[in-house]
Each structure stands twice: as C-alpha cells, then as structure tokens.
Amino acid sequence: MRRIEKPGSLLPAAVRGAKILLTVDGRQIEAYQGETVASALLAAGITTLRLSAKHAEPRGVYCGMGVCYECLVTINGIHAQRACVTPAEDGMVVETCREAEL
Amino acid sequence: MKIESVELLVVGAGPAGLGAAIAAAERGVETVVVDGFSQPGGQYFMQLPAAFSSAKGADMEEKGKLWLDKLGKLPVRVISKTLVWGIFEEEGRDTWLAALYGSDSPRYFRAAKIILAGGAYDSPVPFPGWTLPGVMTCGAALILLKTYRVAPGTKALVTGAGPLLLSVAAHLIEAGVRVEAVCESNRPFPRGLVHLPAILENFSRVREGARYAGKLMSAATPYKAGWSVLSTSGRERVERAVIAKLDKAGRPIPGKTQTFDVDLVVAGYNLTPNTGLARMVGCELNYQPQKGGWIPLRDENMRASKPGVYVVGDGAGIGGADNALLEGQIAGVHAAQETGHLSPASADEILRGIRAKRRSQVRFGKMYGDLFTPQHGLIALAQDDTVLCRCEDVTLGEVKKAIQMGAATLREVKMATRCGMGNCQGRVCERSVSAVLVEAMSGELEAYKSAGYYSIRPPLHPIPVQFLAESQLEDL
C-alpha cells in the first residue's frame, strides 16, 4: 500500500488535492482533499476496518464502490459509514472495528 | 412534505444514464439524474476527484469528459452523492414516486418516466480466506488505482473471469506492484476464434487489450487460462494465495496448485447487473447466465414489464459501456416520444439509427458472455466453513444444512439462515447461495430458475431511522 507518484501511460500525471489530517483510532494520518476515507486508510497501511458480526473476523475494503458494506467505520461519532464512498475531510475522526460494539 | 415533479428521472450517471439523460434532454424532456457518487460518470467514465487536477486524464476519463460536457450544456439537474432508496407506484396516477437519501437533495420526486441505469458490480466467488482484508474486487482495485492513485498492495495475484483482469493487472504493474499471475477461470482460447468477426469490428477494444497484454509481457506476468485462486490465508490480512488448475466445469483439479506470497488478491468473476430497483418496483426478471444472471425482461425500446419504467446498460444485462450508452439513448428517445416531445415518426427514424449502431455491440456482448461467464463449478472452491454471506457471517455449511432441512429456494434459505438479510441486501451472496442450491438439487443449470432470487424491499440501502421517520408522507 502506497501512493503512486510516478506517472505512466495508463495513469498520467495528476496533482492531488490539499493535504489534510485525519485522526484514526487516536492516531493522526495524512490524507488528500478529494480522496475517500477508504483510500486514505489504505494509503496509511490500515486494512482492517471492522470486525464481522458473528465471528469477529477482520474485514476491509472489498467492493470499493458502496455495494458490499464491508468497509463500515465510525466517522465523527456516527457509526456504520461506508469508508469507500465517504470523502475524507480535514479533522475527521475515524474509528475502526467499533461496529460490533454498537 | 414537498414532492417535486419531473417528466423523467434517471437513476445512475454512468454511460447508460448519461446516454439516456442526454438523449431525452436534447429533445426537451425535463430530466433529473440521481447518482450515488461524488461526480457523475459511473465506474467506467470515473473522473479524478474535483480537488485533484491533471493536464490530461486517462483514456476512459477523457472519453467520459466528452459526454459529461454534453450533459453540462443541457438543462439537466444532476443530483450527486444521493441514493434512491425506494420507488413506489402511485395508484390512480400514471406516475412513480422516487424516495431519495442525500444531504442536499429533495426527499421525493414524482416522475412519469423512470430510467434505471444502476450499472454492475464484480461477481463474487467465495473461497477460503476471501473475507481477509487485502482481498478485493476488480472494481475496488481500479478505483483506488485510477481515481485516488493508491496502490492497494505490493505483491498481487489477479484472479477471476473477464477482460477486466487484464486492465487491473496492467494498472497494478504500472503502479509498481509485482503481479505474480493473472488467473482466468475460463479458457477463452482458441474458442474465441469463432467470434473473430465480432472481435474485429470492435477493434478499439482489441487495441486496448493489446496494450494491457504488453504491460503483462514486459513484466513477465503469466496469464493462466483455466486457473483460479483456490484459497488465501494470513492473520490480519492476506499473506499467501494458492491457485489451482480448474476442470472444464470450473472445479479445482486436485494436486495442480501453485503458491505465492502476496499482500493483495484482486478477485472478480465477471460482472453482476445491479437490479435492486428493478426488483423493488416489480419488474419481471429472466435468468440469463451469459448476461450476468437475473435481468429484467425488456422490449426493443428498453421498457421493462412495469409501465413507464426503462432499464438500461449493464444493470439490465452485461454488455459493456458502448452498448450501455446506446441502450440509454434508445430509452431517452423513446421517453421523449412518450412525453410528447417527439413525433412517433421522427422518434422511429432516430431509434432505427441507434439500433443499427447497436448491432455490433450486441454481437460483442454475445462473444463476451460466451467466453467469460464464470462457470457454475467455481462454487466448489468454498469449503463448509467458508463464509458466503459477509454481512451476517453465514457459512456454506450452514446453508447446506438449511437445504437439507428442506429449503429449496433463495427465499427459504434466507428465512432459515439470514443469508441476504444484511446491509448489502444479498448482492454479495445471491450468486453463491443459488449455486449451492443448484448443486443440492440436480446440478442442472435449469435449477437456477427454480432457486429464484432475493426480493428487494425498501429501503434499498440502510438509511438512518431518524431520516425515514422524517420522510413520512402524510398524504400523497
């Protein structure tokens, strides 16, 4: 997991939005305006976003387009938000693996 | 509560929805488009985020821009980041009521005509370890790579069915990810040769495929036809993947395996049409595996079995983006005629032209379905402790038990196991639960029809209870 910096023929050069900061489980991570919470988390190496309901197994981004609801996280205190379709915003507080508790 | 009225409501802003909205609005139809994402374009024409910038976009992005520009010049209202959670037939009127959930959207629209353009998502095939973080669909990988410029791993396996695998692998390679292998569960060669005319008349796609194949070759990534992932394992995320050779039916052949250390497995076994809203409004469906499974029955003008409802694009059966644009145009023009903006004679003439253009796309779609439909036998990858329903954590063993106890349809399995009752409303497990039912019945593919499909009720998406309570309509 890392950000792609070198442009190529399939992915031409692009400039990301302004740098922003998110707090994830108490830790600050850098992100960019325009990307989703899922993209920011993956770029920061955070892959487990929730624990499954019955067996408490780690789950992460699966469909990436809002269909499967595997990437549910708590954002600014509101639970069950889809990380893959929620735009990241400066100062956002994200909590992973809290779905089972609620 | 205020209900806004409009002549035409288009749900989805991918190629099909864009084609429909532009064709209708160009003829003067008052049109509103509702889409779930931040920006119109859908998955295929996905644009960079508005906060990002680039001198020149990727190919599909540039192609999409042309259509988005066209739409932008028309008086069409596009409502983004908004879900349609319900569509209701209004008794005594010839209209539909669509219920919306979004931060700055109206709560309801009343429309005489509705065009559903919901697109498609990767068909999931369960295998041991498929719920581990680091296993994701082709769609997820492509969005991360193309839209957000994030490489979701360092060493990858790409597995599934369909040409999308090549695109994913090529983009990963360009992003500096080591792709150990691309496993295509079908064997498209040499069978594909019978489709040579359809392939040649769609030469731009051949060129696109060749470009991807070039990336694979330069990275020495093997393309293994007739292979699939068998299992993945790891503690907190994927660390290892085993692949297996498959027999013709798609079942793994014992002993023919290979193991890779990877931190990313991209798995997508072709596409499944997103038919949620069509099911909700009661459109009659038809089982056509080569089109992606259960799809709405339609006439030549893309009208479904419910009056005033059209279904277009991959959400009505997998056919690709070019076909989706044309299907959208057909529906848009027909809706323009039905709402009195176009005389039957001129509508006829325009429709004839679009249908002629669509013929080669239909041939391409046939080829695509013939070569890349995931085999029924892939269900043999799942073991008894493999989770089929990710939302409710229901395993294959539990589904088999329900079937032994007498469940004979998807509906009955749902009642017995909670499979399909979770947040995704069965989008992820429907295909595999059907396959298990078919295995238990006769093994004959006809049994898919008797297994049926999950019915969909509003709300289509999980909506906060507070919002639903506030959306209560007192008097229609």
Image (cartoon, coloured by chain):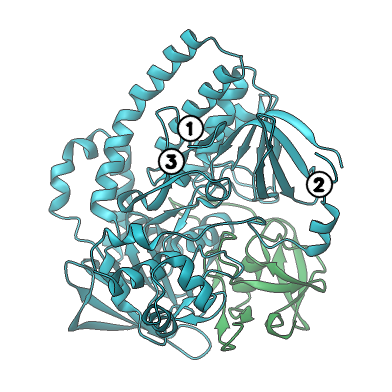
Chain colours: A green, B cyan
Amino acid at dot 1: Arg
Q: Secondary structure at mark 3?
A: helix
Q: Is residue A6 visible?
A: no
Residue picked out by circle 1: B303
Mark 3: amino acid = Ala
The secondary structure type at the circle numbered 1 is loop
Which is nearer the N-term, disc 1 or disc 3? 1
* Callout in the foreground (3, 2): 2
Q: Splitting the image into 4 quarters, where does residue B382 fall?
A: bottom left
Q: Nearer the viewer, mark 1 or mark 3?
A: 1
Left or right: where B221 falls relative to A7:
left
The residue tagged 2 is: B104
Contact between labelled residues 2 and 3, with CB atoms less than 8 Å apart: no
Tag in front: 1 or 2: 1
Left/right placement of residue B283 relative to residue B202 reads right
Which label was assigned to residue B37? none
Which chain's residue wears label 2?
B
Residue B123 visible in the snapshot? yes
Residue at screen point 51% across, 22% down: B334
Q: Earlier in the sequence, mark 3 or mark 2?
A: 2
Who is closer to the viewer here, B270 or B107? B107
CA gap between label 3 and label 2 equals 29 Å
- Residue that mark 3 sits on: B321
